[in-house]
Each structure stands twice: as structure tokens, then as C-alpha cells.
Amino acid sequence: MEKKIRNDYLTVLKSNQRATKGFRYTMPSSSVYPYQWLWDSCFHAIIYTHFDIKYAKDEIRALLSSQWKNGMIPHMIYWAKGEKHHVDWGIEGNTSSITQPPMLAYAIEAIFKKDKDIAFVKEVLDRIDKYYQWLEQERSSPYLLSIIHPWESGEDNLVAWDEIYGLDNPSKEELMKIKLKLVSDYNKLNHNTRKFLKTNKFNVQCLLFNAVYLRNLKSMLFLCQAANSKHRQYYKKIIPQVKKAFKEKLYNEEKGLFSSIYDNNKHVSQIENSSIFLPLFAEIFTKNQVKNLIEKYLLNENKFWLKYPVPTISADNLNFQPNLYWRGTTWLNINWFVVKGLDNYGYRDLSDQLKKKSIQLIEKSGFCEYFNPVTGFGHGPKDFTWSGLIFDM
């Protein structure tokens, strides 16, 4: 990779680093996202394995410092509250009351594989085990996990969620109103997840979330075996059960694709979105399913193989909007998932092509939050840390 890109990224990285209350962490963007987010920090830790392994570990330590007593790790930590992203979470303290895609174990595995520091694994293992067990206890139905808010999916404004709201192509303002109402309703139930899920306000077995969960369970088993931990028996038992539920519940036979489900196992109708590639990351496909996915969808120039893939919804969808947040834009964390997934199945040449196209986005527009898949124009802040995932592709 060109030295200039590396140096430009190091400038972004340094500008987003913070140290407070004895912890070091990295903001997604000092200009727009001046706090700490769960899956962002997991991506940051992965990126740090290529630059500063000590900071990678500190990123994880900072995340774990705000773990709830029940094991939940919140999706936001307000280290120093400001005017941006203020939400009434209905709790005391400096965190949100919801979580995010559970990338934590994978990030720690990446750190361990880099420096073989088993002492660090042992330092954090009990706490991350408590988090994955909390997910299974509080969100499993069984074995597949439900999310209670679109923010938990990481795909905040995905078109697939519109039908759950009962709206057709809602405005940005309508979407925010819905999200804040969900938080308010959750507060009124004193954050009783089981009660909230029964209301079916947003009870979604999200494809991305569950694919990340399954892959991270495998990372947990790896870490437990490396540390000779008693927890390994739990992961040996649960992984095949989650895999079975994933195949049985999330696979849409009619489409030949996996998708998110809601409202008593109803597949989302906007199934052709970027999440269909996440099972590559979880290694859940058969070889024939992978071949179909690549030929019919990924390499289809009318759907996902645009000039700068991978858009968050198929380009032939009437709701495709290539400049709008999660409604047709390209995100480098999604590309990272697809690259890793293609590598899992031996499609190295194709993953290299996607990596090159991802680098071209950076060369054209800088380290932006997301990009137009047709023009390559960058949107959101230009100091977005996780776009450094190009260094891990």
C-alpha cells in the first residue's frame, strides 16, 4: 500500500485517540462521533494490530471498563458528554442501554495471533465470556439472537427495516423519531429485554448480527482453548446449535439466500442487501451456495458489483439511494467482512479485486465514513477510523 495512504491514515488515527480516567480509546471521528462505540472499537483494535499492538489491547480494556454487571457491553460509552448524539437512555452512568454486533472475541483473537500474549487473553476472557453468555440468555430464541433496536444491527437505516416500521421509504426525520421512540419504550419497561421483545416493536433476528455472533463464538472457543479455560465446553456445545438454527431459520429457500427475519419468522422482503454476504464471514454456506451468491449477486453489475462495491442494497432496487446513509452506500467495514468471507472459501483473486476497489475509494475521497458506490464520492466525516480496515484486507 502506498506510503502516502498509510501516513494519511496515521494522521486520522492520532487525531481520534483519547486518554481519560486511566484508559485509552479511539473515537470513530473526532468531528462527528466524539465517544466510544462497541463494534467501532473492535474494528479499531483489529486495525491497531498493524500499527500499535499495545493500543489494540487498551482499546479492548476501555470497552470492558463500562461492561454492565449482568454482562452486557453497551454500544456507546460517553467518556465526556458533549452536545452530539445525546439520547435519554433511562439509566444513570455514562453508557447507552443497548449493544451492537458482538465483534469483541474476533478482535481479541486477532490481537493474540499477532503477539501470542496469553496473559492478555486471560486478563479479559472471563468478562467477554460473560458478555456472550448474556447474549444467549437475554436475546436467544433459542440460539439465534434478537436485536431490539436498529442501532444494534450496526446497519442503522437499512432499507430492510422499513417494513418493520410499516413505512415506505421514510425520511431521515421519520427514522430518527422511530429510533428515539424505541429507546423511550424500552426505558418504560426498565430495560427488561424479554418483556420488550414480546411487544414485537423491533424484534429482529438480524442476519449481520447473527453472522457476527456465530463467527465470534468460534473465536471464543479458540481463545478458551488457548487459555485452557473451563468456558471452552460451553462454546463447544453452543456453536453447532447456533449453526443449525442459523441454517434452518435464516435461509430463504425461495431466494436461495439468507436474510433477517421478524414477526414470527417472517423474512424481510428487501432481502437483497449487503447482509447476504455476511454468512461468508460466518462460514455457513455450502460451496454451491457460495458459487450462486458470487455469480448471481456479488459480480452482478446491475446489483452489487458497481464501480465501487459493495452497496448496502442492490442497485436495481427501487429504494436504492447511493448517497444516503445505509440506503445504497458503500461501507468499508462491509467490504472487510466480504473480503474475509471470500478468503474463507478460497476466492483470493476476487477478494483482492474488492480490496483494490476499496483502496481506490480512499485514494479518491479519503478516509470517509461511507461512499457513493457509483461515483466514489465520500460522505460523512473524512476522519473515520474504521475505514482503516483496508490495512487488514
Image: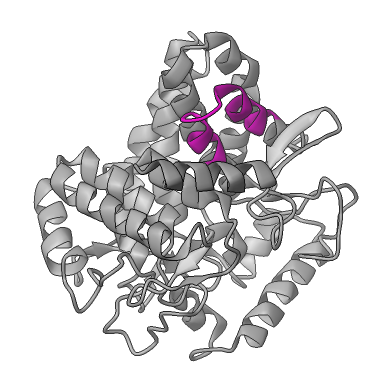
Q: Is residue 243 left or right of residue 326?
A: left
Quadrant that contains the C terminus: top left
Looking at the rendering, the stretch of residues picked out in magenta corresponds to: 44-61
Q: Which SS does the magenta portion mostly show? A: helix
Name which residue lies at 81% across and 63% down: 187
Q: Please identify the quarter of the rendering in which residue 226 is found.
A: top left
- How many marks overall? 0
Residue 281 rendering spot, x and y as whole percentages:
32, 45
**In the image shown, does 264 or 331 lie closer to the viewer?**
331
In this view, the residue farthest toward the right is 92
Per the image, is 56 magenta? yes
Image x and y of residue 360, in percent: 33, 59
Q: Residue at x 77, y 30 (%)?
A: 23
On-image quarter of the N terminus: top left
| Res. 181 visible in picture | yes
* Residue 370 location (% of width, % of height): 48, 66
| Residue 208 placement, left or right of 1 | right
- The image shows residue 238, relative to residue 54, as above or below, that is below
Q: Position of residue 271 (x, y in %)?
A: 33, 72
Q: Nearer the viewer, residue 388 or 278?
A: 388
Asked whether 129 or 175 is in front, the reply is 175
